[in-house]
Image: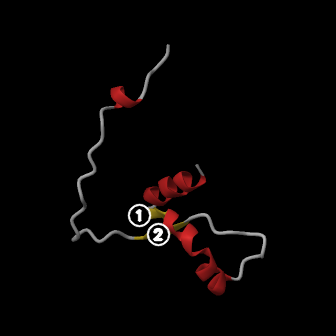
Amino acid sequence: MFLQTVMVLLRAEGMDSCPQMAWAEYHQTVREVLYPARDLVLACGMSVGYADPGVPRPAMPRIPLSEAVTFVT
C-alpha cells in the first residue's frame, strides 16, 4: 500500500515509477552500496523518473471490473 501511494503521488506530479520486487534477490549487492543496518533486508525498490513519450508502451489487457469485483449493497 505504501508503494502504491507513492506511485499515485508521483503520477500527480507528472512522474512515472515502476516497483522492483526483483531487488529482494540482490539485497546483499545493495547492502554493499547503501550500508543499511544489519537487521534490515531490502524487500523491494522502485524506479522513479520521467517516461520517454517516444517509446511505445505495451498493451496491458485487463478483465472487466465486474469479473474481478463483487459489490455488496
The residue sitting at 50% across, 13% down in the picture is 73
What residue type is disc 2 on? Val
**Which percent across, then down, holds residue 25?**
55, 70
Asked if residue 4 is positioned above or below residue 67 in the image, the reply reads below
Instruction: Answer whether labels 2 and 1 touch (C-beta < 8 Å).
Output: yes
Q: Which residue is mark 1?
A: 16
Q: Quadrant of residue 31?
A: bottom right
Q: Label 1 neighbourhood size at 10 Å, few (<14), some (14-19), many (20+)? A: some
Asked if residue 48 is positioned above or below residue 67 in the image, the reply reads below
Q: Nearer the viewer, residue 21 or 19?
A: 21
**Which percent across, then down, holds residue 3?**
55, 56
What residue type is disc 1 on? Asp
Name the side, left or right, on which 23 lies relative to 36: left
Name the side, left or right, on which 72 lies relative to 65: right
Q: Nearer the viewer, residue 13 or 56?
A: 56
Label 1 sits on a secondary structure element that is strand
Q: Which residue is mark 2?
A: 48
Q: Nearer the viewer, residue 24 or 4?
A: 24
Say which label, 2 or 1, has the lower sequence index. Answer: 1
Asked if residue 45 is positioned above or below residue 36 in the image, the reply reads above
Q: Quadrant of residue 70?
A: top left
Name the side, left or right, on which 40 lies relative to 52: right
Mark sitting on residue 30: none
